[in-house]
Amino acid sequence: MGSSESTLSSSQQVDQITTVTEKPEEGVDPLLQQLRSLKITTPILTSVPTENSLTDILVRKPSPSSTPGSLNPKVLLELFSMYRDWQERKTKTISQRQEDIENKIEVVDALAVKLLQRFNYSVSAMRTTAHHLSGVHPLQVEVGELKGRLTEVISNCDALCKRIAEEGPESLRSSVKPFTAVNSSCIKPFALSGNSLEPNRQHSSSLEQLTNTISSTD
């Protein structure tokens, strides 16, 4: 029995307490670094410490004569200076933005004035063009009437020239030719010279001879 108990006890595992060692730091935790970087600052309100021991802190009794806290003048001055600096920065920023907005407004106003001037000029030009175009149709009608009259005159002259060439005297047959003849010098009733229209000399001479002949026959 004793030998069996000894073998069983030796085969069983013995309960042990193991401790976990610190993990090697591969990288610093940022939260831990921030906590380590915290510093204790001077309090704004300073009061006379009344709790001197742990018992006084745990068993706190309201004192009838409580001393009011006093402000630290250095901390208060620092706070006011910080507030003043912040206010000055904000004022500068607001004034700068206001100047930028005013400059943009001036630029927009100038562009609006220029656009309005161009629009008015375009409107006036369109009105002038419309007025000129309104006079084109009467001119076309007048030119058509003049063209018809000129065609009628030319046809009459052509018929008269043909009649003279057929029935006229021998002295006029050689000089007067109809307008429809090929390679005739009297095809063009007007010759363009410069910016003005001048009558053709040969045509004018033939017309003069024709008028003289008609007047002599009368």
Image (cartoon, rainbow, N blue to C red):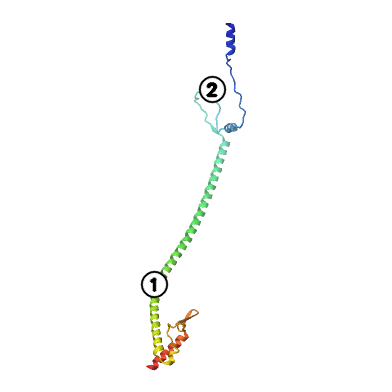
Residue 137 numbered mark, or none: 1
> Which residue occupies 55% across, 45% down?
89
Q: Residues within 10 Å of mark 1 (few under 14, many from 20)?
A: few
Residue 142: x and y in percent read: 39, 76
Label 2 element class = helix
Q: In the rendered structure, which disc, 2 or 1, sits on the residue that comes first in sequence?
A: 2
SS under mark 1? helix
- Is residue 73 or residue 124 the one in the foreground? 124
Residue 144 visible from this viewpoint: yes
Q: Residue at x 57, y 38 (%)?
A: 78
Residue 204: x and y in percent read: 45, 86
Residue shown at 40%/88% (left/top)? 166
Q: Percent position (x, y) of residue 153?
A: 39, 82
Dot 2 corresponds to which residue? 56
Can residue 135 be seen? Answer: no
Q: Report crowding for label 2: few under 14, some 14 to 19, many 20 or more residues within 10 A (C-alpha).
A: few
> How far is disc 2 from disc 1 in space, using C-alphas?
115 Å
> For this rendering, which residue is in front, 143 or 41?
143
Picture residue at 55% right of the left edge, 43% below the top: 86
User: Does 200 appear above or below 91?
Assistant: below
Query: Which quarter shows the N terminus?
Result: top right
The circle drawn on residue 193 is none
Of residues 82 and 160, the one nearer the viewer is 160
Label 2 sits on what residue type? Asp
What residue type is disc 1 on? His
Q: Quadrant of the C terminus?
A: bottom left
Q: Foreground: 52 or 82?
A: 82
Q: Is residue 200 left or right of residue 85?
A: left
